[in-house]
Amino acid sequence: MTTCRPSPTPPGVVFWFRNDLRLHDQAALQEAVQQAHQLGGWLLPVFVHDPAQLATTPWGFIRTGAHRRAWLAAALSELSEQLDTRGSRLVQCEGDPATVLGDLVEALGRPLLVCEDIAAPEEQGIVETLRRADVAVHCVWQSTLLAPASLPFSPDQVPDTFSVFRQAVERAGVRAPAPLPAPHVLPHLPPGERLTAADRWQAAKTPVRHLPPADARSSFPCTEASFHGGERAALAHLQRYCQHCLPHSYKTTRNGLSGVDYSSKWSPWLATGALSPRQAWATIQAFEAEHGANEGTYWLWFELLWRDHFRWLHRKHATRLYRASGLTGQPPPAHNPALFARWSQGCTGHPFIDAGLRELAVTGYLSNRLRQNVASYLIHDLGCDWRAGAAWFESQLLDYDVYSNQGNWLYLSGRGTDPRGSRRFNPDKQARDYDPDGAYRQLWRTGA
């Protein structure tokens, strides 16, 4: 007796969104679309909410705080809307990513899984687990301004010192690739029975994350429509920044402490991938073509190169960046839990430091100048473990970025690649230089 079997489901592709929550300049998504077309099949966009992100850290606080959760939810909400308009949809799953994606791929007939490449150890570990389970994973590198093949050295042999890296890149005349346009139409979703199977992983119990109450003092007012967490607000902000000719003044204002316009404010959107660094730089280049280049526009390039450098360092050093000793042979750092608690609560007794930590707790944002000061104070004045501070920033910052966060804390602790050793900031001098009239300290004298 012959058994009748249903015809095989057309092959397809699962696209796993990670820190790339956008449609513009999406090399990984474009690769997934191309693969789906070549296979004559479907494309299923997926995002996985990992419960490990809500776990308690070894330092006693939640890994992802309320501001970051709400910022992510805003980016995902808009991404879902944008996919809907293109005849697709975003399936949001909940659970351990390796387990969820492995089970989902199995239920869908073992399609190709495409995602962006993230060079941090935890993120690499998820991909390795999937591959050990015989899941076909194709990772696409896309988070840097510069393309790996354009560098004057192998990405795995990047100079450890930023100035050497920058000078080598500039001498070689390396240029950023033009950003890719967003796709207008996406491949169709899986056939009915396969899509029904995928729906079993839909994270129906994942609540909508609402932003904490607005605070008029915030330098990044994310409760306002123009500072929404999605891609469209990111691109509109980029245009507005240039329309107001703010790139020309960036270098002279970037050390400001309060206000919307003292810095570019790109970082929260760059962190979730709602904004591509190549799109940001292409917009600045268009601004230069119309208004001319100056030190301000160059300094935006300079900062984007810093961001790239931290990414290449992760490709080169990997897990060594996460050791207590960092890249050095120093003994493990000391730690004082009581002093750390006072620091995180903005109760150290130093008005300048406490003001910054209160702003961070209330708004999820802090100027770069204050970030360096509060980090230095924790490490060098209070004698606490730099890893606790890095974890606090991961929990609190809207614009937390695994590469830059780890790199900056290592830099300040003297356990990274800076040949000058540790970097202590004198908080009294910093307050005199950057808050001479005490306006910032007065603004954040309390946390509410």
Image: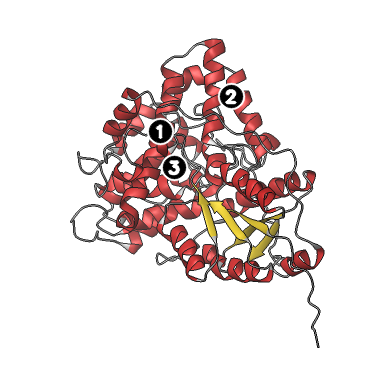
Q: Secondary structure at mark 1?
A: helix
Residue type at mark 3 is: Gly
> What residue does disc 2 label?
241
171 with respect to 243 (left or right): left
Residue 280, position in %: x, y? 54, 30
Above or below, 167 against 49 in this view is above
Q: Is residue 184 above or below residue 386?
A: above
The one of 47 and 14 positioned closer to us in this rendering: 14
Quadrant the N terminus occupies: bottom right
**Which disc is residue 150 wearing?**
1
- Return the residue nearer the eye: 284 or 370: 284
Residue labelled with disc 3:
356
The amino acid on which the numbered mark 2 sits, given as a three-letter code, is Tyr
Disc 1 residue type (three-letter): Ser
Q: Residues within 10 Å of mark 2 (few under 14, many from 20)?
A: some
Label 3 residue SS = helix
Q: Quadrant of residue 185?
A: top right
Q: Earlier in the sequence, mark 3 or mark 2?
A: 2
Q: Specify the quadrant of the image occupied by residue 59.
A: bottom left
Query: Residue at 47% across / 70% down in the picture?
Result: 132
Give the mark nearest the N terminus, 3 or 1. 1
On screen, residue 153 above or below 211 = above
